[in-house]
Image (spheres, grey):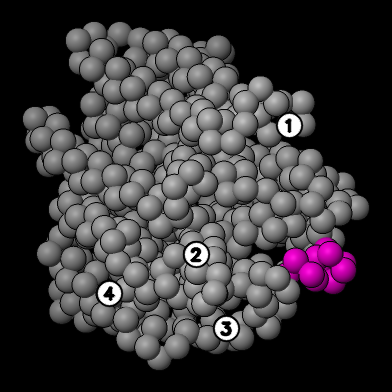
């Protein structure tokens, strides 16, 4: 009976994961639209991700500092359920604010773009609170050893949102017929495509957030779970995170200022290089400061809280990198496919015909669909199938998920071609083999899929045509199971610091705010395809992380 109750609670809880995926993946279509509508460069367009994912960091940091000042775990006082409800309400408020923020904005009115970023930041703040509560909530609904499988199930629902989000947003903004970039500009100039469409969309999203909050409030299936452990202070960790925040504010604050009309101290290539430098400083500040904490805590754990556990410190860097690479691959994909490198033949950097914003939605959907395929596969264990049935499901579930992706794109009016189906099916087979080799072991899974990610990104950078395109698209497949693996490995064995550790991990969704703008600025300076070396380095780090974490957990007899 207890298991049935846990399953009912789990199925209710995972519904909220859908919305995170829907909104996050929709940014992939929203980014190229904003670039055209507001007349901004590639770096500025990536500030959509900076605002949205940066809010995760700020939200979790505020919660941590608030708890530190009061000496009580605020989230535990509320309970996981109430924390999610409060997060939904905050996100709903942000979505409603979109209405006045862009009201009357004309084509090329860049200033309004920054109001859009404020809206996305508020929505992200709500998501931060939801995720801080929901992830440990999911893990708590059963045996900790199978926590990553439950997170995979939740991730599968999340990925369904990421699959249909880009297509639905593209349909709402552009209609069902693909249009060229020039046609889009003309439609915007003539008023045929207006920001009022976005206003209506976000009002609808706000209504859904409120409806889900009410559903959670009245749901009897979902207990108001709490972590009963007392709050543990971490003064050194708090001070380090505040220093990191100040560095990021200075770096990105200066970058924002250089885009204002009053800034004219330097021009051209020199200014672009300094903007890149400021972005890279933020990136290295994250790695440098957290690694500093990782080393210092080994000598004296006092004041470091959850960071005294090396698996948590490394996990923070891994989450930062994983979210960063997952987001940056698709966020820059639109520019890769619509950028003109050969004006005579109208070809993009991959040697393919230049695509419109609406045509790009299919590939963004396919990218995020790859995450759904992997997460559906990774969640099979949750249902406790027999060994024989599990083998059958491991081969059939991925293609069932792929069938959903094909159907959704067909309905949207921008179908996946038979040749594309064949190519992606071959890659799915590679993923299935990876799952069989990993045998439900989180460390082995991370090793295999990180290595596959490195190889795929190298092919994408060095090849051309559909080969390069689908190499980049496989990033979704290979990223798919990393969140639950990293999350469960990071909080393994940290006991009373589990709630605090979860908050630290949610902060590191910050990677989605920092890494895409770095790649965007590299694309502005060099080329969009060359900028994907960032993705190669990210997967390489995740591979190194897998070996380091294995060694750490083995020393603690946790493997």
Res. 526 in view = yes
Q: Residues within 10 Å of mark 4 (few under 14, many from 20)?
A: some
Q: Bounds of the magenta span?
A: 184-194
Quadrant containing the N terminus in the rendered view: bottom left
In this figure, which residue is indicated by the disc labeled 2?
341
Residue 186 lies within the magenta run: yes
Callout 3 touching callout 2 (CB < 8 Å): no
Callout 2 touching callout 4 (CB < 8 Å): no
Name the element at disc 1.
Answer: loop
Callout 1 touching callout 2 (CB < 8 Å): no
Q: Give the residue drawn at x 10%, y 35%.
A: 551
Residue 256 lies within the magenta run: no
Provide residue 261's location: percent of width, then percent of height: 77, 31
Q: Nearer the viewer, mark 4 or mark 1?
A: 1
In this figure, which residue is indicated by the disc labeled 4?
427
Q: Nearer the viewer, mark 1 or mark 3?
A: 1
Q: Give the residue drawn at x 68%, y 82%.
A: 176
Q: Nearer the viewer, mark 1 or mark 2?
A: 2
The disc at residue 533 is none
Name the element at disc 3.
Answer: loop
Provide residue 501's location: percent of width, then percent of height: 38, 30
Above or below — where is 545 with respect to 231? Answer: below
In this figure, which residue is indicated by the disc labeled 3?
414
Q: Is residue 143 left or right of residue 78?
A: left
In this figure, which residue is indicated by the disc labeled 1?
260
Provide residue 11's location: percent of width, then percent of height: 48, 62
62 vs 519, nearest the viewer: 519
The tag earlier along the polypeptide, 2 or 4, is 2
Q: CA distance from mark 1 to mark 2?
A: 29 Å
Name the element at disc 2.
Answer: loop
Choose top left, top right, bottom left or bottom right for residue 117: top right
């Amino acid at each position: 009976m207890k298991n049935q109750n846990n399953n009912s609670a789990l199925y209710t809880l995972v519904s909220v994961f859908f919305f995170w995926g829907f909104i996050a993946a929709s940014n992939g279509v929203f980014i190229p639209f904003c670039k055209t509508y507001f007349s901004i460069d590639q770096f500025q367009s990536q500030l959509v991700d900076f605002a949205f994912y940066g809010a995760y960091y700020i939200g979790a940091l505020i919660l941590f500092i608030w708890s530190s000042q009061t000496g009580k775990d605020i989230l535990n006082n509320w309970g996981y359920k109430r924390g999610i409800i409060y997060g939904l309400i905050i996100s709903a408020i942000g979505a409603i604010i979109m209405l006045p923020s862009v009201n009357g904005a004309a084509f090329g009115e860049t200033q309004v773009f920054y109001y859009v970023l404020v809206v996305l930041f508020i929505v992200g703040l709500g998501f931060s609170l939801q995720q801080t509560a929901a992830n440990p909530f999911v893990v708590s609904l059963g045996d900790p050893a199978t926590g990553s499988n439950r997170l995979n199930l939740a991730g599968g629902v999340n990925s369904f949102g990421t699959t249909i989000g880009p297509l639905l947003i593209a349909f709402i903004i552009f209609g069902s017929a693909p249009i060229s970039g020039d046609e889009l500009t003309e439609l915007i100039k003539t008023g045929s495509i207006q920001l009022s469409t976005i206003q209506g969309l976000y009002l609808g999203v706000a209504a859904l957030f409120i409806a889900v909050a009410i559903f959670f409030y009245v749901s009897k299936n979902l207990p108001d779970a709490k972590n009963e452990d007392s709050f543990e202070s971490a003064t050194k960790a708090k001070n380090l995170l505040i220093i990191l925040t100040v560095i990021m504010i200075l770096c990105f604050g200066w970058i924002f200022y250089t885009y204002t009309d009053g800034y004219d101290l330097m021009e051209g290539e020199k200014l672009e290089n300094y903007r890149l430098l400021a972005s890279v400083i933020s990136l290295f500040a994250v790695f440098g400061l957290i690694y500093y904490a990782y080393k210092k805590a080994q000598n004296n754990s006092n004041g470091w809280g959850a960071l005294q556990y090396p698996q948590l410190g490394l996990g923070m860097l891994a989450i930062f990198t994983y979210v960063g690479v997952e987001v940056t691959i698709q966020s820059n994909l639109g520019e890769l496919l619509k950028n003109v490198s050969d004006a005579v033949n109208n070809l993009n950097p991959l040697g393919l015909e230049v695509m419109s914003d609406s045509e790009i939605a299919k590939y963004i959907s396919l990218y995020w669909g790859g995450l759904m395929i992997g997460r559906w596969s990774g969640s099979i264990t949750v249902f406790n199938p027999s060994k024989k049935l599990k083998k059958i499901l491991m081969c059939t579930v991925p293609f069932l998920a792929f069938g959903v992706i094909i159907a959704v794109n067909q309905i949207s009016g921008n179908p996946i071609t038979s040749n594309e189906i064949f190519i992606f099916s071959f890659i799915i087979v590679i993923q299935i083999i990876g799952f069989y080799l990993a045998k439900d072991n989180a460390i082995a899974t991370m090793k295999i899929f990180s290595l596959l990610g490195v190889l795929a990104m190298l092919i994408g950078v060095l090849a051309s045509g559909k080969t390069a395109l689908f190499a980049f698209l496989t990033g979704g497949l290979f990223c798919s199971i990393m969140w639950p693996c990293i999350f469960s490995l990071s909080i393994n064995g940290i006991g009373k610091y589990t709630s605090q550790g979860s908050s630290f991990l949610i902060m590191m969704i910050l990677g989605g705010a920092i890494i895409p703008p770095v790649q965007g600025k590299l694309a502005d300076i060099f080329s969009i395809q060359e900028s994907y070396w960032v993705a190669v380095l990210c997967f390489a780090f995740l591979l190194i992380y897998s070996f380091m974490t294995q060694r750490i957990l083995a020393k603690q007899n946790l493997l």
